Image (spheres, rainbow, N blue to C red):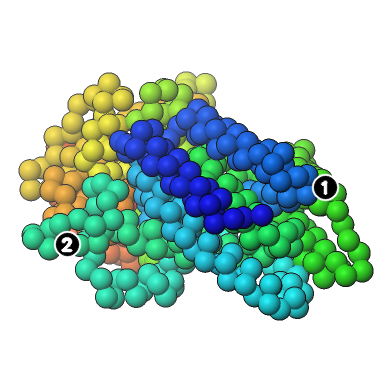
Amino acid sequence: MGTWPLWIEFNAGVALLLLFDVGLFHRRPHEVKLREALLESLAWVALSLGFGAWVYYSHGPGPGLEFFTGYVVEKSLSLDNVFVFLLIFQYFRVDPRYQHRLLYWGVLGALVLRGVMVGAGAALISRFDWVLYILGAFLLYSGFKLFGADHAVHPEKNPAVRWAQKLLPITDTATSPSLIVREAGRWMFTPFFVVVIVLETTDLVLAVDSIAAVFGVTRDPFIVYTSNVCAILGLRALYFLLAGVMQYFQYLDEGLAITVMFIGAKMLANPWLHIATGYSLAIVAGIIAFSILLSVLRPKPIDAAKKLAPKSDRQSPAPEVASASIGRLADANPEVRGRTARDLFAAGVERAQGSLEKWEADAEFRSLVVREKGSASTPGKLFPPKFTVGIAVLPDTFQRIREANASPPLADAPADQDVIEFELEFPGAAPFPARLDILTTTAPGGNGAIARFLGKFGEGIQQVEIDVTDVDRATQILRTRFQVEPVYPATRSGANGTRVNFFLVPAPNNQKLLIEFVEYPNK
């Protein structure tokens, strides 16, 4: 049904909508909140349904139902993209304020790449009918592979990323969502350019299934292309709407797998068994709706959040904590800040727990650990150690978190150390609070400890503090009895007149964690 004027008008309308979106609503980088994401998602869905209604009434029920079926298929498969995009942003620790702009560039590239793929597919099918059978078999295989799919991302293994890092001048810092910046009179690509490469190449791989599936619904390239475009236009808003809850859609992979396999089987059986488009639409929508409903009513007994755990070969002293989580410490809602602080605190303590349990098997070391204060009704009970989890953030994030939490006083840190910090304390699992040290660098891009951490790992859990009554004796015990060497040969000055030393120890998932002993001899 697509004439050249219609193709031009559709793409011009899409370009105008994207310019309007990024030029008006997202002109300034900001973290997209739930309400904004919901309104944007509804707007994009309404536009897509409106376009589908126009196709239905102007070109007939056949093309209209084909568009709606293709749209539902592509929209459903794009839910899986949300998993992957979340992992990509976690891997690169992208500031939530910049994520929408990076997804914008990703969508622009996806429009071009999918247009090329639709054109190539349409040309092959029009010339060789048997290509449809190959696509049907491919969809059966892809659906089978979707059962229990591993959503882990490995950007370091991406050939396009390796090519970019090898051949292009890439700066180590990025303070805005720009893909190219000028430094010292030289144009440099930013790390965000690498993120966009990963988004584009990942979407290209995922698009193979979805475009093949829509060709199983219709052979009209205009319907295939427009249903794809309408689905991915709302993908950015859908990401911010669902990123926080996608881990609970535990049966979504199975629903998508059955959907893809159904369309593949439909393509293979078409010469002998024709399924009307209206029935196909009902079946696809029913499968996806049932998989989501089943996830809500009968969740799997395993921890679904493990599906979102990034798998990386990097040896990092920081656990994988999304910068979006850290950014919520600056949320206007105190309940959101408190919940975020407790989650970050629990993540840090969990990292340190294995090493501490081993050390506390030593009675003398156990006696040096400062513990939480219990109530008078529980005399003699050994309470948990007093932990403080250190979160390293960029200077602008540091300022936003401090202002949102009533500007707590800065710690008196030694002038020769690369750190500015303040402490936050939130009610935790009663009666013990969740304590966080918010840390930032005094010289961004410099060679200080915090600057190097931020440059290498981005914002994240930088350390876990454990209070002890004698840091020299605790250090000696670890060195002689556990063969754990301190980072510094001698105890050094810490913030607010304390004495400290540091230890780099193993943590879960083959990572490393920096543990700081902080001396409080009078406690």
Q: Amino acid at mark 2?
A: Trp
On the image, numbered disc 1 is attached to which residue? 278
Q: Position of residue 359 (x, y in %)?
A: 41, 55
**Residue 187 left/right relative to 38:** left
User: Which residue occupies 92% across, 69% down?
Assistant: 272
Indicate whether 500 appears above or below 316. above
Q: Amino acid at mark 1?
A: Gly
User: Which residue occupies 28% across, 44% down?
Assistant: 393
In this rendering, does residue 495 appear at all?
Answer: yes
Q: Earlier in the sequence, mark 1 or mark 2?
A: 2
Indicate whether 162 appears above or below 91. below
Residue 220 falls in image quadrant: bottom right
User: Which residue occupies 10% across, 42% down?
Assistant: 414
Q: Position of residue 58 (x, y in %)?
A: 69, 41
In this rendering, does residue 302 appear at all?
Answer: no
**Image quarter of the N terminus:** bottom right
100 or 135: which is nearer to us? 135
On the image, numbered disc 2 is attached to which residue? 187
62 or 235: which is nearer to us? 62
156 or 388: which is nearer to us? 156
